[in-house]
Every structure is written in C-alpha cells, then in structure tokens.
Image: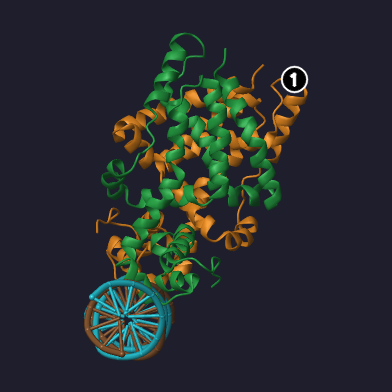
Chain colours: A green, B orange, C cyan, D brown
Amino acid sequence: MVKLKKDATTEEKILAAAQKIFVKKGMAGARMQEIADEAGINKAMLHYYFRNKEMLFEMIFRQSAQKLFPRLNIIFESDAPLFEKIEKFVSEYIDVIRENPYLPMFVLGEMNRNPEGFYKKMKYEFDFPKPDRFLQQIKKDAKEGKIKPIRPPQLLMNIISGTIFPFMARPMFQMHIGLSDAQFMEFIDQRKTEYARFIIDAIKK
Amino acid sequence: MVKLKKDATTEEKILAAAQKIFVKKGMAGARMQEIADEAGINKAMLHYYFRNKEMLFEMIFRQSAQKLFPRLNIIFESDAPLFEKIEKFVSEYIDVIRENPYLPMFVLGEMNRNPEGFYKKMKYEFDFPKPDRFLQQIKKDAKEGKIKPIRPPQLLMNIISGTIFPFMARPMFQMHIGLSDAQFMEFIDQRKTEYARFIIDAIKK
DNA sequence: ACTTTTATTAACCATTTGGTTAGATAATAT
DNA sequence: ATATTATCTAACCAAATGGTTAATAAAAGT
C-alpha cells in the first residue's frame, strides 16, 4: 500500500516490503501480491529478482536473523567483567529489539515451525552467537566465589528471557495490565536498567 | 495421518486433530485437509461440525488459552506468602507448559498477528488471569521492606519471562548450545526449582 | 415398519495464490 | 543509429484450498 522510500532501487523496495509483510504475517500468512503492493511494483518483479516465495523468504529470514543475532557476539566475546557485560547486554539488546520489535516472534516462530530446516542452514552460513566464552566466564566467577553458584546455561537463559520475552508477550501484556503503547515503552525503558540490576542482585553474594 | 483415540466421537477427533495442526502451523499455515487427514475423517465433516476454518480456529484458540491461562489465577489469587507463591507459580506453570510446549508460541504468535481481534473477544469471554492481587502483594511486601524495592509489573514480567520463554526459544537454544531433547528436558527440570530461587535471591533482602 | 433426523462421503465448485509468459520499454553497449 | 541486454507489465495458468452439494448410510423417533 504505502511505499516509504521513493528513490530506492526495485530490489531494495522488494526487500523492505517483504521484510514488513513476512515479519508480520509469517511465511504461511504472507501473500506475494501483498508484498508487491507494499513495494508498489508488479508481482512478476518478485519472481524476477527472487525466483520464488521460498527464496525471498529465506532472504528476509536471514536478513532478520542478521539484525537480531550478530550484536550478541560483540558482547559475548568482549572481556569485560561479568556484571558489566550483563548490564551492557540487557541495555543494548533491548535497544536492538525496540527498533525491530517483531523480529523475535518472527524468527523464533518460523524456527519453531521448521526446526530441522534452519538447523542445517544457519549454523554454517553466518556467525551465530557463540556464548561459550560467556558461559565459561560465569562458570569461573561461580567457582571463584565471585557470584552465587549457578549453572551457566540457566543464567544465560534468564538474561535472554527477560530481555526478549516482554516484546513477544506485548499484546497480551498490554491488554492484560491495561497499558497504552506509550506506557509499554516506558515499561521497557525502566527495564533497560532495572532488569540488569535484578539479575545482578540474584547472583551477587 | 495417525489418529490416536479410536473410540472418540467425531467432534472430539476433529478438535484433537485441529489442536495439533493449528498449534504447530498457526491459522495461516494450517490446512483443512490436513486436519481432516489427521482426524481420519472426511473434510466435509469439519464444516459440518464447525462451519468454517475461522470458527474451528477460534474454538482451538480458546481451548488453548483455556489450557494456558486459568491455572494462573489459582496461584495469583491464593493468599500464600510471596516467596511461596513464586515457587509454586514457576514449578506448576512449567509443568503446564511442558505438557503443551507449543501453546505459548501459538497463543502469543496469533495474538501478535491480530491483536485487536482478540482484545475484544477474550477479555469478556473467559476468566482471564487477573494479577492485580499478586501485584498488590508485591507492592505491599516492598513497602514493608520484606523485599527489595521493585516495580510490581517488572517483577511479574521477570517471573513469567523466565518460565515461558525457554519453551519458545527451544529450537534456537538446543541448536545453539547443542542439547538433545533429553538434555533440554533436564534443563527444564532444573529450572523448576532453580528459577524460583533465582527470583527470590534477586528480591530478598 | 416407516418416517425423520443426524452423520458421513465423494464429487464438485469458486477463489485464491504462487508462478509463468509474451511482449513492451528503458538502459547499455557497439 | 542499432543491436543487445536488463527491467517491467498485463494477462494468463495450474495447483492448492476453503467450502458446497447431492446422495447415502446410520440412528432415533413414531
């Protein structure tokens, strides 16, 4: 319907439109015609530039995963002390998602529907966040008594859950507690600092 | 394909099959024919018992939400002390989801795709969990200095995130850390007790 | 017994949807 | 200028898909 970027190349317009539609409706719910309309071009162009729906989808999925994951590594791989890393992770990652609030539901949802498919592809194709070092750090700090004993994967899961989940549960949460969009954003803003402190409080001695 | 309950009524068979297919593939991805096959009946029966796809879907969605939410109230409304409530919530709710691991993604996903639609319907149609009392309890305990100061909705979100999210991120997580299904279940089992303790550690003085 | 209602099926229908094609137009090279 | 290649469109096509129908079998009333 509404095309945003006027002077973008056709290919870019398609990708932008496809991103929007796929992310909102998923692979199964997205319609090629709708993507074409959104991009303001003829449907045949989609096939001209990207062979078929599946390939276009894969493009978008990869692009989405690229937006979502690589930044993790920057934090995971840094050699800051644990608490600082946690603070950085929560704050920065919330920012990332706030700019693309539908990405987590899209990526995890599609992954859920077709786990094997992605397993093979993704792992080798781009730098997937590798939390090994981060896990090691937790293990070490726990052993040295810097933090309470905790299983590293559990802590990692805790951190990520509290960061990502609020966006996935957003409609439910807003409807439930009765929050406006602005109030939800305020809630998220508080979270940027408070959730890291929460985590740290849970593990510090 | 494989029908499980032999002596179930046709209507039950349809609901069971529809549940399975809808929850796995979502409204858009589910095919009426596939549901019929799964139930081992003629496709026309679906329309005989449930008018059309949308109504069948709504049936399943409601049924799913019923499985997922009402138990929350039992815990929310109880008058146990906070820490006990948290322990109970995490443990019991993980059990609920473990029996229906795809429900959260299904319910939240569909809700995301069509927020307005559900807003109107659900709120009045069945007892939606009302965390008011629980939030009040947190507020009171914080004010009385029983726990560290924390905004009640933030704490609520933390509890729920860590309980539900692991199931939604399961494929990603397993692929990522390299866990077998058995190992993931073990991970979840640990979580039943450890996550409540984690939360409590974060808020206790 | 037989009439009526309920349950079930196979075949069919209309629309949607992903995808193709033949041809036009614009850009680029020679 | 002319040939060649890349970009784009309208019309079309075949398969998939939600939904219907007419006929039949089974159950329930009478």
Asked if C27 appears above or below A54 in the picture, the reply is below
Q: Residues within 10 Å of mark 1 (few under 14, many from 20)?
A: few
Seen in the image, is B200 located left or right of residue A13? right
Toward which corner of the image does residue B152 lie, by quadrant? top right
Residue B59 locus on image (x, y percent)? 48, 61
Residue marked by disc 1? B145
Q: How many marks?
A: 1
Q: Tell me the residue at 37%/26% (across/down).
A: A132
The answer to whether residue B43 of the structure is visible from this angle is no
Asked if A57 appears above or below A191 in the picture, the reply is below
**Three-letter code, disc 1:** Gly
Rendered-image quadrant of the N terminus of chain A: bottom right
Residue B126 locus on image (x, y percent)? 60, 54
Rendered-image quadrant of the C terminus of chain A: top right
Seen in the image, is B27 located left or right of residue D12? right
Q: Most extreme residue toward the right, as rendered?
A: B143
Q: Tell me the residue at 54%/61% (across/down).
A: B114
Q: What subunit carries mark 1?
A: B
The answer to whether residue B34 of the structure is visible from this angle is yes
Toward which corner of the image does residue B169 lie, by quadrant? top left
